[in-house]
Image (spheres, rainbow, N blue to C red):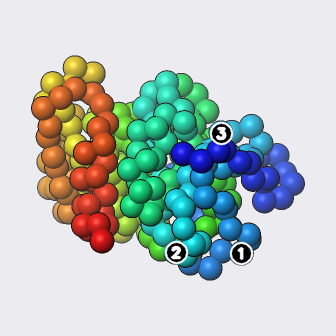
């Protein structure tokens, strides 16, 4: 990817404030108020919290935005490493934040700080990127987080892309986002039978539009899976 740049915070303050109900207030649109974020990877200024945004090359017209959550012990850079190249090659902007603790707040005792960081990061992206549609994705713990947070924010996220999730526990439900889930049949970290299969079945039973794909492999994200997820969300390239 092109070199990393840094954009300052939108204004003074003490940083993101906790959001314990899991609701995100920011709604990116097609008419951003600030100067456009440059192509390449930009580090957002969030008063100590880490957030990266990868913007594809090309004119700054409306683009899809994928928010992606890393697995336990990971960080925003690993999220971009997993999905950034494939996504930006399709013209998708990717936003990734790093969880404040070793994993996401929902799994570490309750929603709050990570939701607030994500909302603040979305606000900065919305100020500098014209956004046509938004999806939330993640890997492992990040996939469980994406499904849980996404179901509570269906008015923002039209699709949820979950790579090897362990569970889903939404703090509430809003809208009907489409769901894509993948899981490896040889996953020894989060076994497929009690994780991917169960989660996809439960969501389908609850009335969500679910696409579930198993693959011959372990606990990982592969480029062809990212391609499949984007195809389900955006349709075929071209």
Q: Are marks 3 and 2 in contact (CB under 8 Å)?
A: no
Gap in angstroms between the C-alphas marked 3 and 2: 25 Å
* Callout 1 secondary element: loop
Q: Is residue 32 visible?
A: yes
Name the mark nearer the viewer: 1 or 2: 2
Q: Quadrant of the N terminus?
A: top right
Viewer-closest of 61 and 33: 61
Does residue 26 appear to the left or right of 49 in the view shown?
Answer: left
Q: Which residue is mark 2?
A: 62
Q: Which residue is mark 1?
A: 33
Gap in angstroms between the C-alphas marked 1 and 2: 13 Å
Does residue 171 appear to the left or right of 44 in the view shown?
Answer: left
User: 10 Å neighbourhood of mark 3: few (<14), some, or many (≥20)?
Assistant: many
Q: Where 220 sits versus 34, above or below?
A: above
Marked residue nearer the N-terminal end (3 or 2): 3
- Residue that appears at 12% across and 32% down: 216
């Amino acid at each position: 990817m092109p070199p990393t740049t840094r954009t300052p915070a939108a204004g003074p303050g003490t940083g993101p404030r906790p959001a314990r109900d899991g609701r995100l207030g920011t709604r990116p649109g097609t008419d951003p108020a600030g100067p456009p974020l440059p192509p390449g990877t930009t580090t957002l200024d969030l008063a100590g919290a880490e957030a990266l945004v990868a913007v594809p090359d090309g004119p700054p017209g409306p683009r899809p935005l994928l928010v992606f959550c890393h697995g336990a012990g990971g960080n925003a850079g690993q999220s971009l490493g997993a999905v950034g190249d494939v996504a930006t090659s399709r013209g998708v902007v990717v936003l990734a934040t790093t969880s404040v603790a070793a994993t996401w707040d929902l799994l570490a005792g309750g929603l709050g700080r990570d939701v607030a960081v994500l909302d603040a990061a979305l606000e900065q992206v919305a100020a500098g990127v014209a956004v046509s549609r938004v999806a939330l994705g993640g890997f492992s713990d990040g996939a469980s987080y994406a499904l849980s947070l996404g179901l509570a924010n269906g008015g923002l996220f039209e699709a949820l892309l979950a790579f090897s999730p362990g569970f889903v526990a939404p703090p509430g439900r809003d809208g009907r986002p489409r769901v894509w889930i993948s899981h490896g049949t040889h996953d020894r970290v989060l076994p497929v039978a009690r994780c991917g299969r169960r989660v996809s079945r439960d969501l389908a039973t609850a009335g969500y539009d679910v696409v579930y794909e198993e693959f011959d492999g372990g606990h990982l994200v592969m480029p062809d899976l990212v391609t499949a997820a984007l195809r389900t969300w955006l349709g075929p390239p071209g």
